[in-house]
Image (cartoon, rainbow, N blue to C red):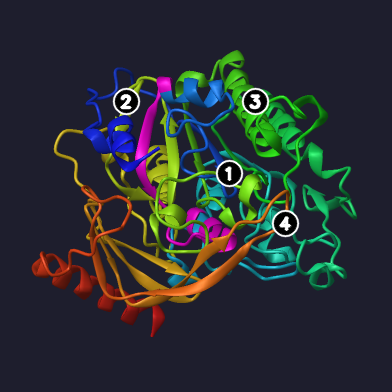
């Protein structure tokens, strides 16, 4: 699809968020379900993109809620993104950068998680999926605010079958944990196809057992991070290769979770959020997702940091709406806390409550002057709070020169970008540097960037 067609078919063609009156009913503290994919591309699901496999459950979710086209993460790498989500803090504050390996400390316990914030408000809490924000007793889920948990402590490629560096992980078997105990001491290629199913079954069971209490359910899927696996029931089902099968199984999982909410009578008092930790790992070619934006995972361009996002909350979020208002994963913790009536943690956080933006309250404006983005420990720039402007400070980045195939990675080269300003409303693909045309905008964002670097990276 060329850029003109893309602009005609998406929010950039002038789709605006639809207004919604204040809540028509006084709701109790809502249940919160957060489905967080791993390396899913912005265009991997309808209605964001046009994949060659069906995603009816995600499409239905969008028809029943709002599609947010400008949702950002502050770093497009696994641990940094998850830490920012769970803590509401920039990677520069927590110093959680990149992707942590086996045994890593991860997010310091001095930073509270969503689980702890909601658990303190008597929410039942659970995480079923890939954790990846700490692999020590004090940084695993049971110590970080989750009553129940199961899944992997880190990425599913950190094992003895790694395609490039198996020796790095040969001494650390990939383990499946449940409620603080190792359930499977060494995951094998026979176990991994069941991950999506296991996470989903645990989620459905948790909903059934928790319907009488407010609950927070966090489902950070291991897929579609490579290596790709899907269960027997989805092998070949998409007709679009392994990646299509994997995405169809994730779509099935969304359907099972939404069905459980409906069947247990809690659908109308549940906020459901569906998004991804970052963009696709395009190095893996036909085993990677799709994004129309520049670059991909592991960069500060929108192909890495912009994730598809859908939110549904019947009676509060307008069904079938779409929004171009920008906000970030760091805003979810304070937003969830506000909905639950829970106090914010005592440690500093960088996110803000953006519920008024989410429900499109008349006159609502983003409370941030800017959002910062980085790759690893390298600060790379800022986006204006309204999402209109993006400033890259000079930095190096990786760019793909040859994609891999069938689970084998491709090749990157190093590139660089000078001080650059992009008009994200007219040029969401970050192609034309307009710094000379808008010197006042550039100066304002440059000031924000310098202040952020001084506070978080000095």
Q: Nearer the viewer, residue 146 or 248?
A: 248
N-term mark: 1 or 4: 1
User: Residue at image x 52%, y 27%?
Assistant: 58
Label 3 element class = helix
Front of the two marks 1 and 4: 4
Residue 385, image x and y in percent?
24, 55
Front of the two marks 4 and 3: 4
Mark 1, residue position: 37
Mark 3, residue position: 252
* Residues at marks 2 and 3, CA–CA distance in whole angstroms: 23 Å
Depicted 394 relative to depicted 181: above or below: below
Q: Nearer the viewer, residue 305 or 203?
A: 305
Q: Nearer the viewer, residue 223 or 453?
A: 223
Label 4 element class = loop
| Residue 342 in view in this figure | no
Front of the two marks 2 and 4: 4
User: Residue at image x 29%, y 23%?
Assistant: 23
Identify the disc placed on residue 321. Answer: 2
Where the N terminus falls, by quadrant?
top left
* Residues at marks 3 and 1, CA–CA distance in whole angstroms: 13 Å
User: Residue at image x 28%, y 38%?
Assistant: 4
Mark 4, residue position: 408
Instruction: For the residues labelled 2 and 4, say whether their Cβ atoms are less than 8 Å apart.
Output: no
N-term mark: 3 or 1: 1
Residue 72 lies within the magenta run: yes
- Mark 2: give few (<14), some (14-19) or many (20+) Cα within 10 Å: many
Q: Which residues are magenta?
A: 63-85
Q: Is residue 438 left or right of residue 22?
A: left
Residue 41, image x and y in percent?
51, 45
- Mark 4: give few (<14), some (14-19) or many (20+) Cα within 10 Å: some
């Amino acid at each position: 699809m060329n850029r003109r067609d893309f602009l005609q078919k998406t929010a950039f063609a002038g789709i605006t968020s639809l207004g919604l009156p204040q809540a028509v009913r006084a709701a109790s503290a809502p249940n919160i379900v957060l489905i967080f994919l791993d390396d899913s591309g912005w265009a991997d699901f309808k209605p964001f993109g046009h994949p060659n496999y069906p995603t009816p459950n995600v499409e239905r979710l969008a028809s029943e809620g709002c599609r947010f086209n400008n949702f950002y993460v502050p770093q497009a790498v696994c641990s940094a993104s998850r830490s920012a989500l769970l803590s509401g803090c920039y990677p520069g504050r927590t110093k959680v950068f990149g992707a942590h390996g086996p045994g890593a400390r991860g997010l310091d316990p001095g930073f509270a998680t969503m689980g702890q914030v909601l658990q303190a408000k008597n929410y039942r809490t659970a995480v079923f999926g890939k954790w990846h924000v700490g692999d020590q007793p004090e940084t695993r889920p049971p110590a970080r605010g989750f009553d129940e948990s199961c899944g992997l402590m880190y990425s599913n490629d950190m094992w003895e079958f790694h395609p490039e560096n198996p020796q790095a992980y040969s001494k650390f078997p990939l383990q499946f944990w449940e409620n603080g105990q190792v359930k499977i001491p060494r995951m094998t290629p026979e176990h991994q196809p069941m991950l999506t199913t296991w996470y989903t079954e645990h989620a459905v069971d948790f909903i059934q057992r928790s319907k009488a209490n407010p609950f927070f359910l966090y489902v950070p899927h291991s897929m579609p991070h490579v290596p790709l696996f899907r269960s027997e029931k989805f092998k070949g089902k998409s007709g679009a290769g392994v990646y299509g099968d994997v995405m169809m199984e994730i779509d099935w999982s969304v359907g099972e979770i939404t069905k459980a909410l409906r069947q247990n009578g809690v659908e109308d008092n549940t906020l459901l959020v569906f998004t991804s930790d970052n963009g696709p790992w395009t190095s893996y070619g036909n085993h990677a997702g799709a994004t129309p934006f520049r670059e991909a995972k592991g960069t500060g361009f929108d192909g890495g940091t912009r994730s598809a996002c859908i939110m549904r909350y019947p009676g509060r979020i307008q069904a079938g709406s779409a929004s171009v208002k920008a906000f970030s994963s760091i805003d979810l913790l304070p937003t969830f806390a506000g909905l639950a009536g829970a106090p914010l943690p005592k440690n500093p956080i960088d996110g803000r409550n953006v519920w008024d933006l989410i429900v499109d309250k008349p006159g609502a404006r983003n409370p941030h002057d800017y959002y910062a983005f980085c790759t690893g420990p390298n600060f790379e720039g800022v986006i204006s709070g309204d999402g209109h402007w993006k400033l890259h400070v000079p930095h190096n980045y990786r760019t793909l020169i040859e994609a891999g195939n069938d689970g084998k990675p491709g090749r990157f080269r190093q590139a660089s970008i000078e001080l650059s300003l992009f008009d994200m409303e007219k040029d969401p693909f970050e192609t034309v540097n307009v710094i000379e045309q808008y010197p006042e905008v550039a100066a304002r964002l440059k000031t924000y960037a310098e202040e952020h670097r001084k506070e978080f990276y000095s």
